[in-house]
Image (tube, grey):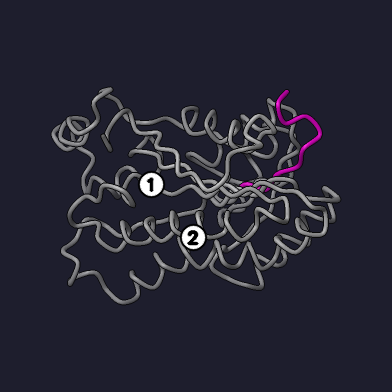
Amino acid sequence: MRLKDKTAIVTGGGSGFGAGIARKFTAEGARVMVADINADAAAEIARDIGGIAQEVDVASAASVQAMAEAALGALCHVDILVNNAGITHLPTPMEDVTEDEFDRVMAVNCKSVYLTAKSLVPHMKSRGSGAILNVASTAGVSPRPRLNWYNASKGWMITATRTMAVELAPAGIRVNAVNPVAGETPLLKSFLGEDTPDMRAKFLSTIPIGRFSTPEDIANAACYLCSDEASMITGVAMEIDGGRCI
C-alpha cells in the first residue's frame, strides 16, 4: 500500500503501459483517474480497478483543462500525474514523414506535458507537494533509425523532465521519467513497421535481457518513483530497458 490515500491521473490509461500503471497504483492504494482519448477503453479499465474514467485529447488545451477540473471535482486533489499518452509515426526516412504526422507526434508527446503542467502544477504548488511522471523512451537516449521525429520527441520529454524537476523542487513537487524499451503495447506494431517473427527477433537482439518490456515492468518503476519511498529522487530518467542503453 505504498500509495495509500494518494490520488492519481494516468493519461493514456486505457491500454498498454498506462493501463498497467493504473492497475498497479490502484493495487497500492491510490484512487486513479484513467484518462484516454478512447473513452470506451478508459471506461473499461476504470471499471476493472474501481477508478474514474475521463475522455481526454492531451493535445487540446480545453480537453486537458476539463480533465483537470473533473479530477479535482471527483478526487478533491491530485497527488500524482502520469503523462503516459503517446504516439509515433511509422518507420520512415525522416524527410518522408509528413508535416501532419510530425505535428501530431509533437502535440501528443510534447505539448501534452506543457498543457498538463499548466492545468495541474498550480494546484500542486498550492498544496506544497506532488509527483509528476513522464513516460519517455529509450528512443530518446539511444535512437533507432527511421523513427527520427518520435526519437526527438522523447528526447524532448527527458529534457523537460529535468528542467521541470529543477524549477519545481522548491515547491515540493518531484518530476521524474521512465524510459521503457519497446514493449507489448498497441504501439509495438508501429515501431516494428510490420509485426513479423523476423522483425521481433531483430528488435529483441538489441535487448540484452532478451525480451520486450511489459506494462507490469513499467508500472513497478512508476509506483516507486511516485511513492514517498522516492522522496529524494527528482529529475531522473530511469531506463526500464533490459540493458539496451548500456
Q: Nearer the viewer, residue 111 or 236?
A: 236
Quick one: which residue is furthest to the bottom in this view? 99
* Residue of label 2: 160
How many callouts does the rendering have? 2
Instruction: Count neighbours of disc 1 (C-alpha within 10 A) and say few if under 14, some if 14 to 19, many if 20 or more.
Output: many
Q: Identify the residue at image location x=31%, y=48%.
A: 141
Q: Identify the residue at image location x=25%, y=60%.
A: 148
4 is within the stretch colored magenta = yes
Q: Identify the residue at image location x=72%, y=50%.
A: 172
* Residue 15: image location, x then y, percent: 51, 42
Residue type marked 1: Ser
The quadrant in which residue 6 appears is: top right
**Marks 2 and 1, how far apart in space?**
13 Å
Q: Secondary structure at mark 1?
A: loop
Quadrant in which the N terminus is drawn:
top right
* Residue 161: image location, x then y, percent: 51, 54
Instruction: Look at the picture and state if 103 lies above or below 49.
Output: below
**Disc 2 or 1, which lies upstream in sequence?**
1
* Residue of label 1: 137
Magenta stretch bounds: 1-10
Quadrant in which the C terminus is drawn:
top left
